[in-house]
Image (cartoon, rainbow, N blue to C red):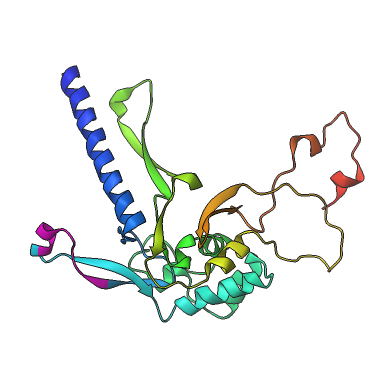
Amino acid sequence: MILLGILSKREIARARLRARTAMTVQAREQGRYLGGRPPYGYRLADAGPHPNRAWARRGARSQRLEADPTTAPVVSWMFAQRRVGKTVARIARALNDAAVPCPSAADPERNPHRSGGRWTLTSVGAILANPRYTGRQVWNRQRTDHELVDPANTALGHRDIARWNPPQDWIISRQQAHPALVSEADFVAVQGMRARTTAPGACLPARRAAPLRGVRAADGLLLVPRSPGLPLPPRPHQRHRPWHEPTAQHLRP
């Protein structure tokens, strides 16, 4: 029984490797849509018969992303507002004041678990950080890990945990696969900018650079900050220790 279990795990690992290798080639070289929920601003369109002949004989059709005439202008407006220096909170507030449907409200069939009430900072930030709006197909941004519920008691089974992959593991298509809602130059500029929250010329305290992530541009892969506009915790040597007297830098808001 132990030998059969080892052979079964080996076959599962081989099948997983073959599937991931095929999907990597399809996403990078062909720019194929590999399923999943379409991003806000896009909708699914028919792309002809399925490339697999067996599936095509069954009537299966392949799909691709196309710009949604209702939500695509909203995405372009969000990038334009962020490009001129508006904060993520201000963009979300403007969308709520204008009664623009949020992603879950615009597509309630795929979001039955969400309320669809209002725009939040998380939803706006996720849209502004999604490289698929540049027209390139991006796959493998997330992964699912199978971990034991209790390592001391394997009889409890496994659980699935979704985690974000590092930028070097992303699969980005070499060519544009669908209509772009923002140019690559504007997308990279939005990732590396901070909204102006003080008067021009005011002195700002030193700030640590945000973690970097890769974004494929026209001339290759660029490294840009991961979380634009979000405050970062101070460095360990900048934190106030109880045996030190607080300084003016620590008392700044």
On the image, the x and y values in percent for residue 129 come to 54, 60
- Residue 120 seen: no
Rendering quarter of residue 113: bottom left
Q: Residue at x 53, y 79 (%)?
A: 99
Q: Residue at x 30, y 55 (%)?
A: 26
Q: Is 127 situated above or below 45?
A: above
On the image, the x and y values in percent for residue 182 come to 51, 71
Question: Is residue 52 shown in magenta?
Answer: yes
Residue 165 falls left or right of residue 229: left
How many numbered badges does the structure rendering display? 0
Q: Is 4 situated above or below 17?
A: above
Q: Quadrant of the N terminus?
A: top left
Q: Is 19 situated above or below 218?
A: above
Rendering quarter of residue 238: top right
Along the line of sight, the residue nearer the viewer: 233 or 168? 168
- Residue 243 seen: yes
Q: Residue at x 33, y 49 (%)?
A: 24
Bounds of the magenta segment: 46-56
Along the line of sight, the residue nearer the viewer: 95 or 29? 29
Q: Residue at x 65, y 49 (%)?
A: 210
Q: Residue furthest front?
A: 219
Residue 138 falls left or right of residue 15: right
